[in-house]
Image (cartoon, rainbow, N blue to C red):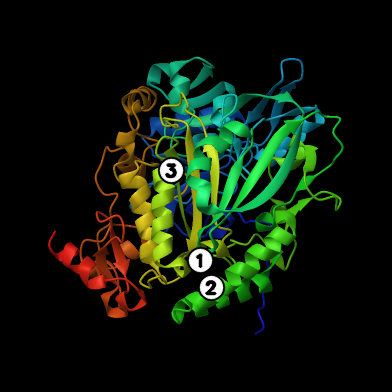
Amino acid sequence: MIYLVNSSPPEDPIKCSYNTNFNCTITNTYGTFPDRTICKAAEAVFPTTEEEVISIVANATRENRKMKIATRFSHSIPKLVCLDKGDQDGLLISTKFLNKIIRIDEENMMITVESGVTLRQLISEAGKAGLVLPYTPYWWGLTIGGLIGTGAHGSSLWGLGSSVHDYIVQLRIVTPADAANNYAKVRILENGSPDLNAVRVSLGVCVLGVVSQVTLKLERVFKRSITFSERDDSNLGEDAVTFGRQHEFADFTWYQSQRKVIYRIDDRVPNGTPGNALNDFIGFRSTPSFVLAIFRTLEEIQESTNDAGGKCAVAIINTSILKYLSYGWRNNGTGYPMVGFQNQVQASGTCLDSLEGATCPWDHRVKGLFFHQTTFTISLSKVKGFIEDVQRLVALEPKALCVLDLYNGILMRYVTTSNAYLGKQEDSLDFDITYYRSKDPMSPRLFEDFLEEIEQLAFFKYGALPHWGKNRNVAFIGAINKYKNVDKFLQVKQSYDHLGLFSSEWTDQVLGLKDGLSIVKEGCALEGLCICSKDIHCAPNKGYFCRPGRIYKDARVCTNPSLSTIDIQTRKTICTSM
């Protein structure tokens, strides 16, 4: 096979007509939203200063014009950046050029940045001053506005926890206002302000206004010592409850089909400890486009031929290579433990520097990875039961979850209780699951019922909270009722934007203000747009029917009976009797 490709660093998610800023579309970095709609806007603007943001918001408010904020890379999977379908006058406000470091206060260990600054920029500039953020997401291609708005985090139960939004000292946000205030207002929120708890996590870049500047509390640079230890998963349920208290930056990578777990033993060490390790995670490296095309083609062949054994074989090769290469970490060949400075090991993303012929693995401009993500947090008081339920499910058909090992298993990270109204409600463990998605929305996935059951187990049996910037529609059904301070969030929303100019149909649905999260139609369960209740919601013409779950009988999943080794008729009887 010969693949002719032309790739580069990620393109701007906003595209407008004829080199103007009018008649625009916006997508995410993956090239599609969960419902595969094309999101449009009448105009896009690219402010470079807070003063320009004030003018833009004032003009739009005066004209009663809907607004949405977009970021440089647009990494959120749900439709957080989308204006309402049919809106002929909507405005996109991009933070692409709000990308300046305002000040670094070395004495008080704080940094003030514009909201479009990327995590990579912040880490680099703070590091030059001998300062670091103590906890961050592992991917540095996020903007500060975007990552705080979606509640992005690293992994820790120590200190204030791993969510970046909990380290905000001050935040400036531009909101609509009345005529007496010239239609726009800059609100300066200090740490301790109740309103800040609404803005910290606010469904993406913001449904309250435009965050213009953020001040974050930093620490003096420190070193970490990291060891990846492979173990079987027999004690994972118990260890998940305690491991995060034992190691400051602990996490897990779980390969269920292989019954293996990679325990990350990760703690601070004195700065004099020898070592200069570098995190260059393989999954975030630039990859030749032809390699991505071959991998995707192989996946599609395995899916179309129901080749679960082939998936498992490739998964074992994949995970063995990752282990051999220390998952992309570099330590001058000295092995474990790997010791390095925080700003060199806390995040990575070198594929953002891709040259022609290579790109990030998920770049939609080439034939590369195309996937769903299901990401949720389960409180530590319930996590053992969830893990054991998943293990019971895997035991029924181990090869069913080899698809997860192809995407480096399930990443499990610790997060703490947050004061943010839409933040974490308890100390929890976050599960990040990535898996194959068909280019054809009507095409079922091999053993998709297993992943659907895990998804429903998490959200409905164990009360999991969704990651606001990931997930399929199903994850958000009833989610807002799990937040005890949602009423306080809605009060701030009403105060800041009583006309709903920064709201959309999607955000109103997520906040429980409108119905419509479930899109019930033929094949809707295949893409997570609904939970099946009829066979037509699956793909009966391709052998996939709506049935109860295997261990969670309240689940309704799309099953292919010819692939199952357990009593399908029993499950069918349960379903039809409901």
Q: Residue 315 in the image: state x and y as whole percent.
A: 58, 68
x%, y% of residue 25? 48, 55
Where residue 272 appears, as percent x and y from the top left, is 86, 30
In the image, taking residue 98 as reference, residue 209 lies left or right, namely: left
Identify the secondary structure beneath mark 2.
helix
Q: Say what amino acid the circle numbered 1 marks.
A: Val
Could you tell me how far apart the alpha carbons at marks 1 and 2 are, in whole angstroms? 6 Å
The residue carrying mark 3 is 384
**In front here: 441 or 544?**
544
Q: Which residue is mark 1?
A: 403
Label number found at residue 9: none
The reply to whether callout 1 and callout 2 are in contact (CB within 8 Å) is: yes
Residue pointed to by mark 2: 311
| Residue type, numbered disc 2 | Lys
Sequence-wise, the earlier of marks 1 and 2 is 2
C-alpha span from label 1 to label 3:
23 Å
When the figure is inspected, residue 21 is found, relative to residue 398, above or below; the finding is above
Q: Is residue 310 above or below residue 511?
A: below
Quarter of the image holding residue 65? top left
> How many other residues sit within 10 Å of disc 1, few (<14), some (14-19) or many (≥20)?
many
Q: At numbered mark 3, what does the secondary structure look like: helix, strand or loop?
A: helix
- Front of the two marks 2 and 3: 3
Q: CA distance from mark 2 to mark 3?
A: 28 Å
CB contact under 8 Å: marks 2 and 3 = no
Q: Amino acid at mark 3?
A: Lys
Q: Residue at x 58, y 74 (%)?
A: 313
The mark that comes first in sequence, 1 or 3, is 3
The reply to whether residue 295 is in sight is yes
The residue depicted at 67 percent of the width and 64 percent of the height is 320
